[in-house]
Amino acid sequence: MKQCSPFSIIKNCYNCEKKFNLLNEKIYCNMCGKLFCIYCLNNYLNDFKIIKVCNKCIIKYNEENKNKDENINYYEKIINEKNNLINKLSKKIIKKNMVDKSTQTI
Ligand SMILES: [Zn+2]
Ligand SMILES: [Zn+2]
């Protein structure tokens, strides 16, 4: 992540370059840390409407999350396959043990 610009020095919106004043509040993006006006910073990261991010960051965030979901599905698939294999193996082992025990007793 890039270093945040000093809050008080920045006087214009990073996106539309509108000057900040009492009516045009400066808000910083929670992802890139750049300062935007209220018109340019109107995306929220989650449904609770707490974390505000700029237009570029919301696109980046959505793309990354989409990839994450795909990765999770991919890993879940692998884990499921592994579990199936383990189940099969453990059934085999139990059978083998039973055979071993039966041969021991004889
Ligand atoms: Zn702006
Ligand atoms: Zn941003």
Image: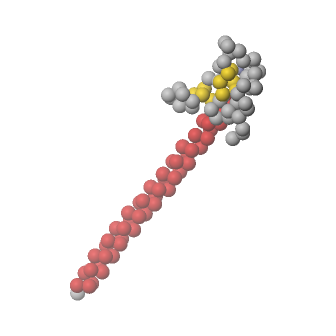
Q: Residue furthest left?
A: 105
- Picture quadrant where residue 65 is located: top right
Say which residue appears at 23% left-offset and 87% top-offset.
106
Q: Nearer the viewer, residue 22 or 33?
A: 22
Horizontal relation, residue 78 to residue 94: left or right: right
Percent position of residue 73, x then y: 51, 48
Q: Nearer the viewer, residue 36 or 68?
A: 36
Numbered disc total: 0
Residue 75 vs 44, above or below: the answer is below
Horizontal relation, residue 10 to residue 101: left or right: right
Percent position of residue 5, x then y: 73, 32
Q: Residue furthest front?
A: 8
Horizontal relation, residue 46 to residue 87: left or right: right
The image's colour scheme reads secondary structure
Say which residue appears at 27% left-offset and 80% top-offset.
101
Q: Residue furthest top?
A: 23
Percent position of residue 98, x then y: 28, 76
- Please identify the quadrant where the N terminus is shown: top right
Q: Nearer the viewer, residue 63 or 21?
A: 21
Visible residue check, residue 21: yes
Q: Nearer the viewer, residue 56 or 28?
A: 28
Visible residue check, residue 39: no
- Picture quadrant where residue 42 is located: top right
Q: Residue furthest bottom?
A: 106
Percent position of residue 27, x then y: 65, 24
Say which residue appears at 38% left-offset and 65% top-offset.
88
Residue 75 vs 22, above or below: the answer is below
Residue 68 vs 75, above or below: the answer is above
